[in-house]
Image (cartoon, coloured by chain):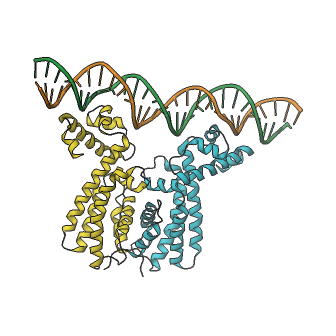
Chain colours: A yellow, B cyan, C orange, D green
Amino acid sequence: MAAAERSLRADARRNREAVLDAAAELFAQDGENVQMDQIAARAGLGVGTLYRHFADKQALRAAIIGRRFETVTRLAREAEEEDDAWTAFETLLVGYLESVEPDTAFRFSILSAEEPTWADIESEKDAFRTIMTRICRRAVEAGHLRADFDADDFILITRGAMANMSGHGGWRRHLTLQLEGIRVV
Amino acid sequence: MAAAERSLRADARRNREAVLDAAAELFAQDGENVQMDQIAARAGLGVGTLYRHFADKQALRAAIIGRRFETVTRLAREAEEEDDAWTAFETLLVGYLESVEPDTAFRFSILSAEEPTWADIESEKDAFRTIMTRICRRAVEAGHLRADFDADDFILITRGAMANMSGHGGWRRHLTLQLEGIRVV
DNA sequence: AGTGAACCCGAATTCCGGTTCCGAATATAG
DNA sequence: CTATATTCGGAACCGGAATTCGGGTTCACT
């Protein structure tokens, strides 16, 4: 793909970016229900142009989702720099959620789970998961997280928080509950 | 509505039930993406008949969701009978989630949050919430739940669990984490 | 057992949004 | 500057799914 990018005509590359930006913004805002026409309009282009760059709507979505994964992966790398194991974990957790909060499309794509030919994204997904796993492990070993906590649990927690992001900012409260537990023993 | 039911012709009432049952089953199974034709077929009726009983697809959905609320409200009433405050709470929590697990449509409608003209359902929703609030309060007062736990938190917790119901049965694990907390202090 | 209102049926229509297509416009090589 | 390959634009197309509509059917009352 990097090679392909280089061989793209100047205007084409510019437009491709415009499409990506417009799509990102609209998908983030309205999630699933955005029309190709709207994206084209926002990008100041014709629909035809979208299809020149992306096979179909699904592909465009995939590109957007992939982008966000790159973002959070970068974020994870930063978090890993933290000296304290707990700080690293908390930074990742909160950073991830904050980054994802305004992106309706991403949240829904995660929550919907089905995701047919989402195969494209797999590699980005893995990159994130790898780092995330290390950070979790470190926090467990340092005794800051329950001994049986693992990467899958991180996903459970974040999905849970994401489910409480619509409208009311209840997800922060929920995160507290998840960290501390609701039961008194 | 009760009066209207009485004045319905025998076959009409029967068909109405058939539609409701068929719709409930299909919506539960496939969530959002069910066609009116399918529902009609499953009910052994023509599409026209669906529209005789429900203004549009949305109205039908609303009726189904309302139904499930009635179910869980009944469930809550039962839970409240429990002598032990914690047992009552746990019964409600787990019972609610188990009851909701197989109902894709319901889960999505809760998670999607937007809910345009969902106003119809409000009363059913309130009925449930009232009882649920009492049960939570009792568990708090008995010292089984953190002191600041309230009805809104119940919703956060359940939404969280519901977000982890697609496919993998991870929601039970998530529920444990939510009850006990993931952090070690 | 007749009558009319209520009800049912499902083909036809409408609506909606993704995708295609090809002439016009534009960038780059020579 | 010209030629040629690329890219753009957006009206037209198309399929899928909701909704309508009017003629046929069934119930319930007398």
Asked whether B96 or C22 is in front, the reply is: C22
Please say whether residue A100 is visible from this viewpoint: no
x, y percent for residue A156: 39, 65
Determine whether A107 is above or below A137 in the image: above
Residue at horizontal 29%, vertical 66%? A132
Q: In which image quadrant can residue B91 be found?
A: bottom right
Q: Would you say C1 lies left or right of A181 here?
A: right
Please say whether residue B158 is visible from this viewpoint: yes
Please give the count of numbered marks on the rendered protein.
0
Asked whether A85 or A183 is in front, the reply is: A85
Q: Would you say B61 lies left or right of A95 here?
A: right
Determine whether A40 is above or below A160 in the image: above
Residue at horizontal 27%, vertical 32%? A45
Q: In which image quadrant can residue A25 be found?
A: top left
Determine whether D15 is above or below B87 in the image: above
x, y percent for residue A34: 37, 41
Q: In which image quadrant can residue A147 be found?
A: bottom left
Asked whether A23 or A130 is in front, the reply is: A130
Q: Which quadrant does the C terminus of chain A fall into?
A: bottom left
Q: Which quadrant does the N terminus of chain A fall into?
A: top left
x, y percent for residue B162: 46, 62
x, y percent for residue D19: 55, 35
Q: Would you say A135 lies left or right of B28 here?
A: left
Asked whether B37 or B85 is in front, the reply is: B37
Residue at horizontal 36%, vertical 54%? A107
Residue at horizontal 46%, vertical 49%? B115
